[in-house]
Image: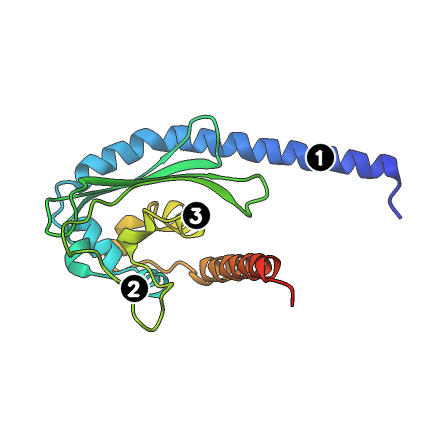
């Protein structure tokens, strides 16, 4: 059995390890920032780069009910910006050419994940849909959403996929060569959905009138 003194020492080791991981993450982001900036400018010269990369991403079909390739083809830029001080904060931004669906030139979603990773503070975009163009969820699933709608809701779990997998490996996705293991993200997303359902059930039970 581990003594209290040893347990305290191990906890300090765990904290030091977490602090080191944090610093390494921030340092990597600092080093990658100019590299991603250079890549960003180069990819703007490639016709329909982001629409193709997203279209080749099988996770898009799994995550979103509505994957409109024509709308994806209007994407001119996709970027993930990490906060310089807080590794748990990042912003996903997507820019579009003029289109018949909405007025926004850019949609952004800023996510700050809690220390335990279970929740997040989300600053989201308001989508200015053009008259009659708002996409409706499939009748069979009122909870279904589209890639565009995601930027205006409170979900943060899908953001980790864009941040950690899709954005760094965008060139591989474009070339149809990505071999990432998507099961990790699907499991996390399904778990997050179950937690949300449980919270909603609890709220309904609390609100239900007594008989």
Q: Is residue 84 visible?
A: yes
Query: Could you say where residue 69 lies in the image, as x and y percent from the top left?
Result: 18, 60
| Circle 1 residue | 13
Drawn side of residue 92 relative to residue 182, left or right: left
Say which quadrant the C terminus sits in. Answer: bottom right
Query: Circle 1: is it few (<14), some (14-19), or many (20+) Cα within 10 Å?
Result: few
Q: Secondary structure at mark 1?
A: helix
Location of residue 45 by image quarter: top left
Drawn side of residue 180 relative to residue 48, left or right: right
Question: Residue at horizontal 17%, vertical 48%?
Answer: 102
User: Mark 1 or 2, which is nearer the eye?
Assistant: 2
| Circle 2 residue | 137
Given residues 180 and 162, the one toward you in this image is: 162
Q: Residue furthest bottom?
A: 140
Question: Residue at horizontal 33%, vertical 58%?
Answer: 178
What's the distance in space between the residues labelled 3 and 1, CA to CA?
30 Å
| Circle 3 residue | 156
What's the distance in space between the residues labelled 2 and 3, CA to CA?
19 Å
Given residues 24 and 119, the one toward you in this image is: 119
For the residues bearing labels 3 and 1, Cβ distance under 8 angstroms = no
Given residues 123 and 42, the one toward you in this image is: 123
Residue 172's tag is: none
Question: Residue at horizontal 35%, vertical 63%?
Answer: 144
Query: Could you say where residue 165 lies in the image, as x and y percent from the top left?
Result: 38, 50
Q: Earlier in the sequence, mark 2 or mark 3?
A: 2
Q: Secondary structure at mark 3?
A: loop
Query: Could you say where residue 42 lies in the image, as x and y percent from the top left?
Result: 18, 38
For the residues bearing labels 2 and 3, Cβ distance under 8 angstroms = no
Q: Earlier in the sequence, mark 1 or mark 2?
A: 1
Q: Residue furthest front?
A: 211
């Amino acid at each position: 059995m581990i003594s209290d003194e040893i347990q305290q020492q191990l906890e300090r080791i765990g904290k030091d390890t977490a602090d080191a991981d944090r610093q390494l993450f921030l340092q990597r982001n600092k080093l990658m920032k100019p590299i991603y900036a250079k890549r960003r400018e180069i990819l703007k010269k490639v016709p329909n780069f982001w629409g193709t990369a997203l279209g080749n991403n099988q996770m898009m079909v799994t995550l979103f009910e509505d994957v409109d390739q024509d709308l994806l083809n209007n994407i001119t830029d996709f970027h993930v910006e990490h906060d310089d001080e807080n590794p748990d904060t990042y912003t996903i931004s997507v820019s579009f050419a003029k289109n018949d669906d909405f007025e926004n030139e850019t949609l952004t979603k800023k996510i700050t994940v809690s220390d335990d990773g279970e929740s997040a503070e989300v600053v989201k975009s308001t989508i200015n849909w053009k008259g009659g163009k708002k996409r409706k969820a499939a009748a069979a699933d009122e909870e279904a959403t589209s890639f565009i709608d995601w930027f205006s809701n409170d979900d943060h779990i899908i953001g980790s996929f864009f941040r950690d997998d899709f954005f760094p490996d965008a060139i591989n996705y474009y070339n149809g060569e990505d071999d990432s293991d998507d099961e990790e993200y699907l499991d996390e997303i399904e778990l997050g959905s179950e937690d949300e359902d449980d919270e909603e059930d609890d709220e309904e039970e609390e609100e239900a009138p007594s008989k």
